[in-house]
Each structure stands twice: as structure tokens, then as C-alpha cells.
Amino acid sequence: MTENAPCEQSRTGYTQKDTVQWRRQQFQSFEDFVVEEVPVAFVYNGISQAVMMATPCDLEDFALGFSLTEGIVDSSSQIYDLQITQEHNGFQIDLQISSEKMQALKSYRRSLVGNTGCGLCGVESLNAALRSGKSVTPAALPDPVAIHAAVDAINSWQRIQHFTGACHAAAWCDWQGNKVLLREDVGRHNAFDKLIGAMRAQEIDETQGFALISSRASYEMVHKASFLQCANLVAVSAPTSLAIEQAKQLNINLIGFARNGKHNIYHSSQS
């Protein structure tokens, strides 16, 4: 895989903007740190597939994770080349994928006939709106002490959040609650895609820990966890009803409201 953009390690994910603050009965000028948010276009074999608003760091991880969780590819081996190009108003990620997967993607694209702004455009039935995840091998719940060790530490792990206060995180933690890997993004789905891509690229064993997300646990987050074959998903905020149903169907332990020394178990595959 190649990359035409500046080295991703040089991109902080945040920038400084001139700001005026009202404080102590007067206005004060200063430079505030704000999270970067730019369009990121995914182009497969020369055909544009999606444009996401994202934080432009860890884009190679994002491309791999997005491709996996959207079902565009089944493994990184089906991506033959990846190039990231910085444009004047965002980034374009060009991926070359196998002809078999590209044919499947073209067939899927032909079914998307709706108009912009219509929600799930071109999806013609309720069943089609709910994509199938991948069943996960059931596993035991993480130790509560490990869960809260990770929850208590996640803010200190978030570099972009520290500077901006506007970034989501997805972390992979070991069974003791230590950080193995963490990715950040202005979008919670993007952060999880970045984590999934990074774990696949680094060949991290998804059976040796749990995923922790700094947001609510929606259906999409459980869906993405299944592509990681992650048996334990911990969220600091609430789950949705559909997320709980999806977790039950896919054998994923779903834990929500993990904060302040407490957490709720919404589904346990061992019970």
C-alpha cells in the first residue's frame, strides 16, 4: 500500500483557530484548539463509493476498517493497493480491490436508486435496512475491575480529545483494562472503523480483550464489533434497543453506562 499524502504521523487531528472568549466580564482573544473535520472520499477501482466527514489522521486504518465493516472486502488481502491524496478541501482514498469484490460492490451500487436526504437511500424494505453481521464465538464477560480501569483511563489516552474536547475514541483493552490500541475521530463510527482497521493491520488477537467506545452503543457499533469478531463491547453511554437485539443475535456481550464505578450488562452470551 502506498500513500501520497503527508506522513499520517505528522497530522495531529486538530488545528488552531482565532477565537474570542467572554470571561471575567470582558472579551479576550486567543487561539483555540479545534478538532479537524474534513471530507474523506472512498474510491474503489476508480469508482466513488462514499464520502465521510472525518478527522484526517490514521486514514489507512480508516480505509481498511470501513472496507471491512461495510462488507466491501472480507480481508486486507483483497485490497491490492491504497493511495491517500490530499485535495484542497479534503482527502481522497483510492483503493484497488479484487475483481470479485468489485463486481459485488457494483451489484450493490445498482440497488441504490434513492435520492439524497432520504435516509437509507435505495433500500426498498425494512429487512434490507438491517444488514447482517457476523456471528461471534461466545466469551466470558470482562472483569468489572478491568472495565473500570479502562473507563477511568480513557480520557488520559485521548490526545485529540485532550486538546479539543470534541473527539470520540474506540480502544482495544487487554483483560486487565490496559490500553493496547486506541483511535480517535470526530465521528464515533469512524473511530471504531479506524480501530478495526488498525487491529487487522497489526494482527492483534481479538479474543484477548474487549473494545471500549466513548459513545453510546448503537446498532451500527454492534454491527462493526461483529466484523472485528469482538465478543465484548463496552460503551460509556447508553445502548439502543436495536443494539441489544443485534448483540443477542451475534453473541456479543454488550455493556453500557460504564462510568462512575458502575455498568449495566444488557446482554451476556454466557447467561
Image: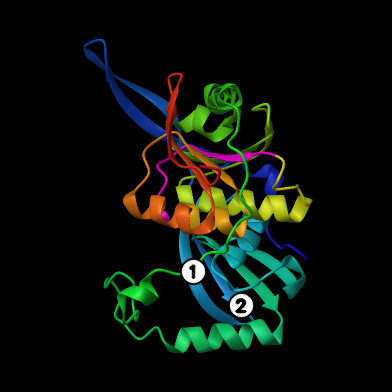
Three-letter code for the amino acid on which mark 2 is drawn = Tyr
Residue 80 percent coordinates (x, y): 76, 74
Q: Kindly identify the residue that appears in the image at 40 percent across and 33 percent down.
A: 18
Q: Is residue 51 magenta?
A: no
Q: Nearer the viewer, residue 129 or 193?
A: 129
Q: Secondary structure at mark 2?
A: strand
Q: How is the image coloured?
A: rainbow
Residue at the spot of label 1: 132
Confirm whether residue 155 shows in the render: yes
The answer to which of marks 2 and 1 sits earlier in the sequence is: 2
* Residue 72 in which image quadrant: bottom right
Q: Are marks 2 and 1 in contact (CB under 8 Å)?
A: no
Left or right? Give the position of 182 relative to 188.
right
**Magenta residue span:** 209-219
Q: Where does the N terminus fall, quadrant-wise?
A: bottom right
Q: Nearer the viewer, residue 75 or 239?
A: 239
Left or right? Give the position of 252 relative to 172.
left
Eyeballing the image, is 139 above or below 149? below
Residue 97 percent coordinates (x, y): 69, 78
Gap between marks 2 and 1, in whole Å? 22 Å
Residue 76 percent coordinates (x, y): 73, 66
* Residue 114 in which image quadrant: bottom left
For the image, the number of numbered tags is: 2
Residue 92 percent coordinates (x, y): 58, 67
Q: Kindly identify the residue that appears in the image at 51 percent across and 76 percent down.
A: 49
Three-letter code for the amino acid on which mark 1 is drawn = Ser
Residue at the spot of label 2: 44
